Amino acid sequence: MVVSAPPTTKTAPGLTREPGSYWITTFGCQMNKADSERMAGILESMGYSPASAELDADLVLYNTCTIRDNAEQKVYSYLGRQARRKHHNPNLTLIVAGCVAQQEGESLLRRVPELDLVMGPQHANRLETLLTQVNSGQQVVATEEHHILEDITTARRDSSICGWVNVIYGCNERCTYCVVPSVRGREQSRYPEAIHLEMEGLAAQGYKEITLLGQNIDAYGRDLPGIAENGRRKNTLTDLLHHVHDVDGIERIRFATSHPRYFTDRLIDACADLPKLCEHFHIPFQSGDNDVLRAMARGYTVDRYRRIIDRIRQRMPDASLSADVIVAFPGETDAQFRRTLDLIDAIGFDQVNTAAYSPRPNTPAANWDNQLEEDVKVARLQEINALVERCARERNARYTGRIEEILAEGINPKDRSQLMGRTRTNRLTFFSSEGPDGVRYGAGDLVKVTIDVVRSFSLSGTPLPKD
Ligand code: SAH
Ligand code: SF4
Ligand code: F3S
C-alpha cells in the first residue's frame, strides 16, 4: 500500500483536529451515493456529526464524478469556494473522494493546494486510517489499486426504507467512451454470504427494499472462485438473486446496472418467478445503430437488445424499461442518430437518460479525429429529449385508474399531508397519508393506491380502504 506524502506539507504538524461537523456532497451515480453513505458512517463512528450547512462544516468531503466533462468541472467550482474558506479557517479538513480523485490523483494537490486528502473510490472504507494520517500533518493521496475490504463499515444511510447493497465493484469492460474502468478498477465481487448478511442486517433495521448495485451487475461472480455445476458457473447474478430472495422483511429487490451483452434468459426468468424481484429493468443500449455500437465496443447488436426486451415483455408484460443513451458519438451520422430515435420510439421506454458524447481522458474515442461539433450535440440532445419525454408520458398514461402497490418511503416534502413512494415498476407516486377509513400510513408501509393523476415522471393517487 502506498500513501504518498507530497513534497510540501501544508498543514502545520501537530495541528489538532478533533472530530467536529462534516458535510458530504455526492456527485454521480448510485455507486458514489452508496460510497458516501459508508464514508458518513465512518465519520460518525469517529465522533463527527452532520453539519447544518456546507459553509459551517469542519470537514467537507466531495465525492466526485468524472463521467462527462461538465460533471468534473462542477467539482472545481465547489472546491474553489472551500479553498478560499480554508485561508480563514486552517482547521477545515478538505477531501476529494471518488472518480475525479482517482483520475487526477496528485495533480489535484497542485491544482488545489488547500486539499488535505485525495482518495479514489476503492479507498472509501479506509477513510478513518487516511484521516489519521491527515491529522498527523500530511497531505495524503490514496489512489493505488486496492482490494476493497469486506464490510468493516456501517453505512449511515439516507433512507430508512430503501437501501443500496454493493455486489460488484469496478468494471472490466472497455467501452471506448467510458472512464469508469480506469477510475473504478477491476471487477471485485462480494461473496453471496456477505451480501445475504448485509441484507439481513438491513431487514432487522426495518428496511423493506434493496437495490443491488454494480456498474456491470451482470458480470457478478465471474471473479469469484468458480463452483461449476453441470458445466455452469454457480455464482452468477441469477444465482445471487435466488440466494438473497429468502431474507425475511425485505419485500422488494431491484438491481442495476444491466449490460445487454451479458443479460441472460435465466435472469429474466428469475425476475418473473421470484415474487420480490420488481418488474423494472435499467438496460442501457447507448445507440440504436450497429456500427456505432461496434465503435463503442459494446459487444451486442440492436437485434440482440430487442430480443432481450421482447423476452422481458413476454414474461412480464407490464415491466417498465429504462436505459441510457449517448448522442453525437464520434462519427455518428444523422441516419445513425435517427436509428437511435427509432429504437426509442419502437420500444416505448418508461425513462431514458440521455447525454451528448463527452471526450474523457484515457479513453480511445477521445483521440479519434471524427469528433462532432457542439451545435450537432446540442441539436441531437434536444430532439431526443423531446421524444423521451413523449414516450414517458405515453407510458405513464397506462397507470390511469389502476390500483398499484406503493412502498411508502417518506413524507412528500412539498405537501406534508402526503406520503411518497414507488410502484414496483419504479414510478414515483404521491398519495394521502390517511386512507378513506381513517387509517394512517407511514414510511415502510405497502399501500394499495388508485392512480388518479398521471404526469410525465410521477403519479398521484388515493389509498384504498384496508381490506
Ligand atoms: N455501466 C453502465 C453505465 C455507466 S456510466 C453501462 O454500461 O451502461 C452511465 C452512463 O453515462 C452510460 O450509460 C452512458 O450513457 C453515459 N456515459 C458514459 N461515458 C460517457 C461519455 N464519455 N460521454 C457521454 N456519456 C457518457
Ligand atoms: Fe463504462 Fe462500459 Fe463499464 Fe458501463 S460497461 S461502466 S459504459 S466501460
Ligand atoms: Fe461518475 Fe464514477 Fe459513477 S465517474 S457515474 S461517479 S462510477
Image (spheres, rainbow, N blue to C red):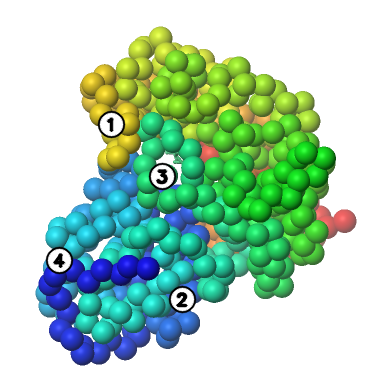
Decide which of tag 3 and tag 2 comes sooner along the chain: 2
Secondary structure of the residue carrying tag 1 is: helix
CB of mark 4 near ligand 3 (< 8 Å):
no
As measured in the structure, the alpha-carbon distance from the residue carrying label 3 to the one carrying label 2 is 25 Å
Q: Residue at x 43, y 61 (%)?
A: 146
Residue type pointed to by label 4: Pro
Q: Earlier in the sequence, mark 4 or mark 1?
A: 4
Amino acid residing under circle 1: Ala
The residue at which mark 2 appears reads as 42
Mark earlier in primary sequence (2, 1): 2
Residue labelled 3 has its Cβ within 8 Å of some atom of ligand 2: yes
Residue wearing tag 4: 113
Q: Label 2 vs label 1: CA separation?
A: 37 Å
Report the quarter where the C terminus lies: bottom right
In the structure shown, which secondary structural element does the residue marked by tag 4 occupy? Answer: loop
Q: Which residue is mark 1?
A: 366
Q: Earlier in the sequence, mark 3 or mark 4?
A: 4
Image quadrant of residue 251?
bottom right
Where residue 347 sits in the image (x, y, percent)?
60, 22
Check residue 180 in the rendering and tell me which mark sits there, or answer none: 3
Image position, residue 379 (x, y; %): 31, 21
